[in-house]
Amino acid sequence: MRNSIWFLKGLRNGKKTERFPAADPGEPPLWPSVLEGKGEAACPTNALESGEWNAGKCIACRRCVPQYLPTGNQKTYSLSQVAPRLLSRSFYLYQVDSGTCGACNAELLSILSPQYDASRLNIFLTNTPRHADALILMGVYTEGMDEVISKAYEAMPDPKLIIALGTCAISGGVIGKAPVLSSKAVVEIQGCPPSPYTILEAIVEAKGGVK
Ligand code: SF4
Ligand code: SF4
């Protein structure tokens, strides 16, 4: 009975998958997005040193409002390297939780939902590092996970990328330091947590576009 309700609801609502990143985001959130502003503001993570907003340290706590305000711009990621061309046709991600609150994990999984449908862009999750093209690191450094992460990375075939997802994995956020392997990350997806739009666009760019 419950299944038939969802089936009928799906028929009534029609196709929900967005065309993003080929088209603009359908419902971009204000938090997290690029912050703009100026002046002094109390920031618990020193993300506003010298009046410059450092997205990799921001935990979206909103203590700097109204001096700094969100713009809705979802481009809160940076890349220092793109995957070799051979990975552009299909891109398999292996996720590791070093010590998260759970929100980065939820946003990453949501890119597979019908709204974003990462598989139409040839992006997939794998549950073994041996089939992975990129290691997605989430959460702060924890002693117990450090060796696990290193072993997962060693088990991945070349060529391989590391993607640090979320403020904890990039800078340690407000409670710790980043996992050791984050220093090798070639893609940083900032946000606490990043929006699915940001995650999807960063991964598409990391794999060299849509083929
Ligand atoms: S929203 Fe970001 S920049 Fe503003 S105070 Fe919080 S951590 Fe600092
Ligand atoms: S970056 Fe923010 S949302 Fe992601 S695990 Fe850390 S505290 Fe949670």
Image (cartoon, grey):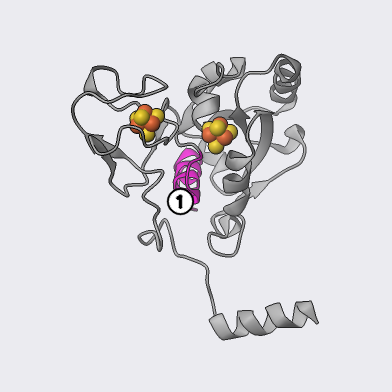
Look at the picture and state if 128 lies above or below 48. Answer: below
Residue topped by disc 1: 197
Does the Cβ of the disc 1 residue fall within 8 Å of ligand 2? Answer: no
Viewed as shown, does residue 162 lie left or right of 154? left
Look at the picture and state if 194 lies above or below 9. Answer: above
Residue 160 appears anywhere in the view: no
Viewed as shown, does residue 97 lie left or right of 121? right
Relative image position of residue 8 (x, y in whole percent)? 67, 85
Find the magenta span and give its range.
193-211
Q: Quadrant of residue 176?
A: top right
Question: Considering the image in quadrants, where does the N terminus appear?
Answer: bottom right
Please give the name of the residue rendered at 59% of the width and 53% of the height, measured from the top-left corner: 110
Tell me the element at label 1: helix
Q: Quadrant of residue 128?
A: top right
Relative image position of residue 111 (x, y in whole percent)? 57, 53
Residue 198 appears anywhere in the view: yes
Relative image position of residue 75 (x, y in whole percent)? 36, 42
The residue nearer to you, when weighing 211 against 177, is: 177
Give the class, few, some or many, for how many residues have Cα within 10 Å of label 1's Cα (few <14, many ≥20): many
Q: Quadrant of ligand 1?
A: top left
Viewed as shown, does residue 33 lie left or right of 112? left
Look at the picture and state if 92 lies above or below 169. Answer: below
Q: Amino acid at mark 1?
A: Tyr
Q: Quadrant of residue 80?
A: top left
Please give the name of the residue rendered at 61% of the width and 57% of the height, measured from the top-left corner: 119
From this viewpoint, which residue is outermost toward the left?
A: 39
Relative image position of residue 96 (x, y in whole percent)? 68, 32
Residue 198 colored magenta?
yes
Residue 183 colored magenta?
no
Please give the name of the residue rendered at 34% of the width and 26% of the height, measured from the top-left corner: 54
Please give the name of the residue rendered at 43% of the width and 59% of the height, measured from the top-left corner: 20
The residue nearer to you, when weighing 210 against 21, is: 21
